[in-house]
Amino acid sequence: MRFTPEQHDAWETQGYLVLRRVLPASALQDLTRWVDEVESWSLDGGPGLHHFEQTPAGPRLARAEDFDPHHEGLSSFLRGALLGEILAQLLGEPAVLFKEKINFKYPGGGGFAPHQDAPAYRFIDHHVSCMVPIDPATIESGCLWFSPGHREGILPNVDGRIAAPWLASARWTPLEVFPGDLVFFDSYAPHKSDTNRSDAPRRLMYLTYNAASRGDLRERYYADKRAELEATGEAGRSGHVLLSINDDFLGQPVPAPTRKAAP
């Protein structure tokens, strides 16, 4: 896959690139089934790292991550030729996996305050993430919104949330996406999302990569993150669920007696 001049310009100027209807129906069926399997792990003590939030319907899974070593199908997709070829063009060299996650965002699930990913990704701050929609992500269901600013590097922030003075002049554009689409964005691209106000989940898989010349840092990242979460606890200084080194998630913590989501 080679980019058109318009696509190349969008990547350089906006910090993100949208590729419509890239994945065939057979791939989407596999991905949906595999995401369901990862979600089931959160209910029966399976592998991976799972985070929950309180919604109007009760506790629900907010995020699952660190599943690459435990799921052959998903690993083959996120390490496959299609994504590898695209990422090599965006990074200018081969890519290696840095981290992987699925944000579930069930009805009433929390959004994310304006932020960049770079402050949350220690060891190196430049990455490219691929967003893979499992469900439609619309304004109603809490799609991502992007703002120009990726060329400014890491913006002033408080615990990962972009500081108010920069936000005062920010211009946000919603990005609605659908199963089959792929979205690539770099770790400096400012983005945010809202609460899911629809009656269906808004599952998005995010696969994050770095240039191979910077090294394979995935295991180091997850060891560091697990240690950080163990030291910090369930909630960040904002009082919301802590999903990341960034304290940018707006989901509500689950009451202590019920940490797991309903099936």
Image: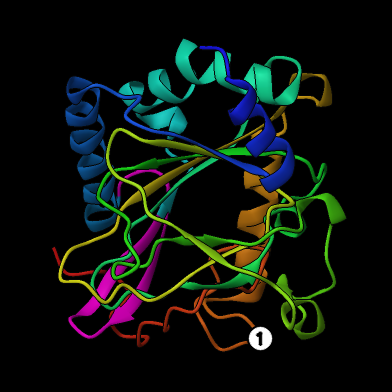
Q: Position of residue 180 (x, y in %)?
A: 30, 33
* One can see residue 80 in this view: no
Q: Amino acid at mark 1?
A: Arg
Question: 194 above or below 63?
Answer: below
Give the magenta range.
46-63
| Residue visible at 22% across and 86% down in the picture | 56
Image quarter of residue 261: bottom left
Counting from the top left corner in percent of width and height, residue 249 is at: 53, 73
Residue 258 visible in the current orientation: yes
Kindly state the secondary structure of the residue where label 1 is placed.
Answer: loop
Instruction: Describe residue 74's horizontal placement relative to residue 17 as left or right.
Output: left
What residue is drawn where x is 72% and y is 50%?
121
Residue denoted by label 1: 237
Q: At 84% across and 59% down in the image, what residue appears?
A: 154
Q: Position of residue 2 (x, y in %)?
A: 56, 12
The structure residue drawn at horizontal position 17% and vertical position 81%, both measured from the top left corner, is 57
Q: Is residue 45 left or right of residue 190?
A: left
